[in-house]
Image (cartoon, rainbow, N blue to C red):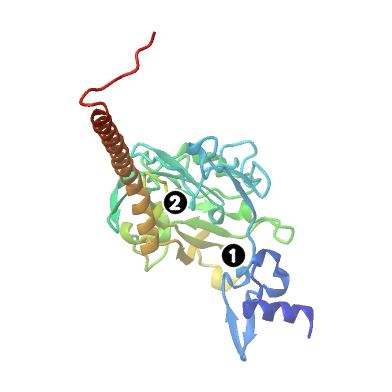
Amino acid sequence: MSENVRERRSVEEGQCEDLRTCDHDAITKDKQAYVDCKCEWGLFRDRNVTLRKPITMNHGIKDLGMKGWVRQYDGSTELGWWQKGSTCDKVGGQDGGTLSPGAKTDDKLEMFIDLMCRKLPLEFEKKVEHAGLESLRFIPPMNALGSHDDTDAKRRNEDNACYCMDKFDCYGSGLLNMAPCKVRSDLPDGAPIALSFPHFYQADEKYLNAVEGLNPEKEKHEFYVDIAPDFGFPLAIRPKFQLNIVINKDPDVPAMSNFADELILPFLWAQDGFSEPSEEMASAIKMGLEAPAKLSLLGGVGLMAVGGAMILAVLVWLLVTKRQGGGGLTFPISR
C-alpha cells in the first residue's frame, strides 16, 4: 500500500488526530473527480482539510480592548492586494471568532474576512435577544461596499478608493473586483470574479436590473453579527456574500456578441456562521454573567459567618471569665 493511500485511509478512519501534522497534499481532493462512475464537482471540494493562510491576532492580555485584533496575515502587516501603503492594504480589523469585550452601541467595528479579501465596517443597528441573553447587532452600513465616486451620497464611500487598482476595472457601489487578490503565477490577471452581498443587496440598481430572478431582502441577505457586550462573544454571526463572474462582450463569439460590454453575472451566494448560540454556549455565558453577583453574595455571607463566629467566641470568653472571676472581669493594666 502506498504512503498516500495509507495516509488518506488513516484520516478517513479517524487515525489522524491532528490535521496540522497530516500530509495535506495526499488527502486534498481535486475540484472535480469521478466517484463511482459519476462526475463530482464542487467549488470548495478542493479546500476540504486544507490549511488557510495563518493569521496573527492580539490576545488582549495587555490591552483587553485589542483582543482579537488581526495584526498579521500570512506573516505580513500588508495584504499586498490593494494600493500600496493604503488603509485598504493594511492588515487590521477584528477576527470574527474572538471579539473584544465591552461592546457599546456607539462602537464602529471593522471585521477582517480573508474570503472577501478585505476588512468590512460594521455599525450598531439594534438589540437582539438570544436564549434569554441580550446582544448588540452590528451590520455593514449602506456604503460598506460603496464606490468612492457614487453620485448617491448615501452609498458613496471615499475610503474605498484604495480598492481600485491600475489595470483592473473598478466597479460601482455594492461590488468589489476580486481579481487583484486572485493573482497567481498561472493567473497573472487574476480571476474574473466580483464580490457583492447576496442578490446585489445594497448594490447599484444597474447590476440588479441587468439580470432576472433576483430579489434582495434585508432579512435574507444582510450580513450581521450579534455580540454579547459583556464578554464580546458572538451569539449569532452570519457572513453572507455572493460571487459573480465578470463576462465581457466578445463580437467574435456568436453566443457572446449580444452581451452588454460588461456583464456581472451571479453564480453563487453563500452564508457561514450560525443564527443561534448552542445551549452549552448560552449556559456558559449565563453562568459567567451571574458569577460576580453570586460570588459577592457568597463573600458577604462568608464574612457575616466569620463575624458571627468571632462575636460568639468573645461572648463565650466573657461568660467563662465572669464565672471564673466571681462575677467580676479583670483586664490587664499597663504600667
The relative height of residue 257 versus residue 168 in the rendered view (above or below) is: below
Crowd class of label 2 (few under 14; some 14 to 19; many from 20; radius 10 Å): many
| Quarter occupied by the C terminus | top left
* 243 with respect to 188 (left or right): left
Residue displayed at 38% across by 41% down: 103
Q: Tell me the tag on residue 174.
A: 2
Q: As drawn, which residue projects farthest toward the front?
A: 326
Rendered image quadrant of residue 40: bottom right
Q: Quadrant of residue 8?
A: bottom right
Left or right: where does residue 156 sit relative to residue 54? left
Q: Residues within 10 Å of mark 1 (few under 14, many from 20)?
A: some
Front residue of this view, candidates 14 and 287: 287
44 or 20: which is nearer to us? 20
Q: Circle 2 sits in a helix, a strand or a loop, which is it?
A: loop
Residue 45 placed where, x, y %? 59, 73
Q: Horizontally, is 244 left or right of 72 in the view?
A: left
Residue 305 in view here = yes
Between label 1 and label 2, give the one nearer the viewer. 2
